[in-house]
Image (cartoon, rainbow, N blue to C red):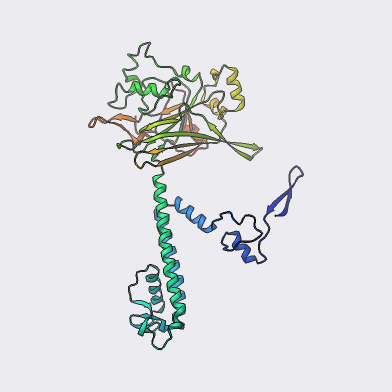
Amino acid sequence: SVFNMGYTGKHGGKQFTIKPTKKYNNPIMNWIDAYHLNIFDHATNVDQHLYKPSSFMFHYINWTFRASFTAVFISFLVIFYAINLFFAWLLYEAGMNQPECITVSGDHFGTTDTKFSDAFALSWTTFTTVGYGMTYTSTGNNFGGEPPTDCSWIVFLCTAEAFVGLLYAGMCAAILFGKVNRIQSHANLIFCNAVCLQYEEVDPSEEVDADDTDAEGGPERTSDIISRSSDNNLDDFVEDEENPAAETATEETKPVTFVEQFNGCPVLKFQVVNMLANKQGSEMVDAIMKVIGVKHKRNGERITQSQYVRVNLVDFEHPFFSRVWHGVHILDGTSPLLKESAKKKIRENGGSWPSEWFKPKVIHDKLDFEDLVVTVAGISNISAVTVHSYKRYKKGDVLIGFNFAPLVFQNKSTGMLEVDLSLAHDVREQRGGGGEDLRQSRLQRHQSIRIKKSSVH
């Protein structure tokens, strides 16, 4: 290795750039080696057995996975024409030197004014192995007085082009096959554009989800209470105060309150909707939801470190995800999404939030993260392959004092439970109020969402 001295650091330490030694004395060979295009091993290279793909092929193939099918087809077409034009130019030059070696409609090459057009026709028919017969390399009596050995260069060009054409067709097929596999491995999910932070009591009659399951051996979750009570009336979306389940609840069936369940701590809620929820057999088996928080360490105004922290969910597994799934994270004294001073105060308060903190602006000041990444993976019941999807949220995408709108309803004509996918991004203020004013806060927050009034009232 060679050492290139850089600048002197802020604290006086010298900074160096470490580069590998050059393998060759020839600068062209060193450039080829830098882009992993070399085909020769170097005896003194300790990394010669490491796999290093061509940089161009690496970037192009990775791009084909990200790009649309239309863009990929256009790139195939551009490369197809570029290769054919290159070989057409070679065949044109060779045909001009030895016109007897190429036959065009029974005559030698160059007898008409369409010389390059004839060379291009020979090129693309050879590349695709179509071979219409209108333009071809001379054989038998077509040679005239030209010795066949003089046509070796043209024969070699056509043979090489046919070989390249077969390789190109195989590469295109492999890329398309990879894109199809990529589609099969993508989970058809809708992540709500916002994250809800809830800190008030939950009405047990509020409908949000008929798909959540109990955490085994753990406390009953809010979404489970909602689901069972909403099953008593599934004819349509029912407003909270109209559901008779809350009126007939006894002491034995009275659900656990928000404070009792989460020990007086707010919760972050993530909503994931199965895009194929209204089709039979479109479930995700053994689904797992994970959340990662991204925190930035700063030195003044400069970001010096990006830290990833694991965010624990109340129930991160779903054995049979078919409709709607709510991931819940409790913002307690152990949450990595809160400032250290806030977590210390919560622990000193017996594990609960101080009552004076339950204000949107105060809650926002206690949060300590930049982004949230939610991933969901499982086995598709359609293709029986592992699928996954993810969503990245900004801190400004967290709506304080809001909950997700109910999605599940019963189709009166079929009697089946269905999901209104048009409401997948709808939220409503938590029961009891206290939600932030979205019309004012959206002008101040750093977010990736637009907020507008829902068409559902």
Q: Considering depth in this image, is 386 or 343 the residue closer to the camera? A: 386
Q: Residue furthest left?
A: 413
Question: Which image quarter is the C terminus in?
Answer: top left
Position of 80 with respect to 445 (left or right) is left
Residue shown at 72%/50% (left/top)? 16
In which image quadrant can residue 44 be found?
Answer: bottom right
Tell me: residue 395, above or below residue 157: above
Coordinates of residue 325 in the picture (x, y in percent): 40, 31
Position of 410 with respect to 7 (left or right) is left
Tell me: residue 12, above or below residue 119: above
Q: Residue furthest right?
A: 12
Q: Residue furthest bottom?
A: 145
Q: Is residue 71 visible?
A: no
Q: Considering depth in this image, is 300 or 417 the residue closer to the camera? A: 417
Coordinates of residue 301 in the picture (x, y in percent): 64, 39
Tell me: residue 94, above or below residue 349: below
Q: Is residue 410 visible?
A: yes
Question: Which image quarter is the N terminus in?
Answer: bottom right
Q: Considering depth in this image, is 125 or 232 the residue closer to the camera? A: 125
Q: Considering depth in this image, is 407 or 217 the residue closer to the camera? A: 217
Tell me: residue 44, above or below residue 220: below
In which image quadrant can residue 29 be found?
Answer: bottom right
Coordinates of residue 215 in the picture (x, y in percent): 43, 24
Residue shown at 46%/38% (left/top)? 449
Coordinates of residue 214 in the picture (x, y in percent): 41, 24
Total marks drawn?
0
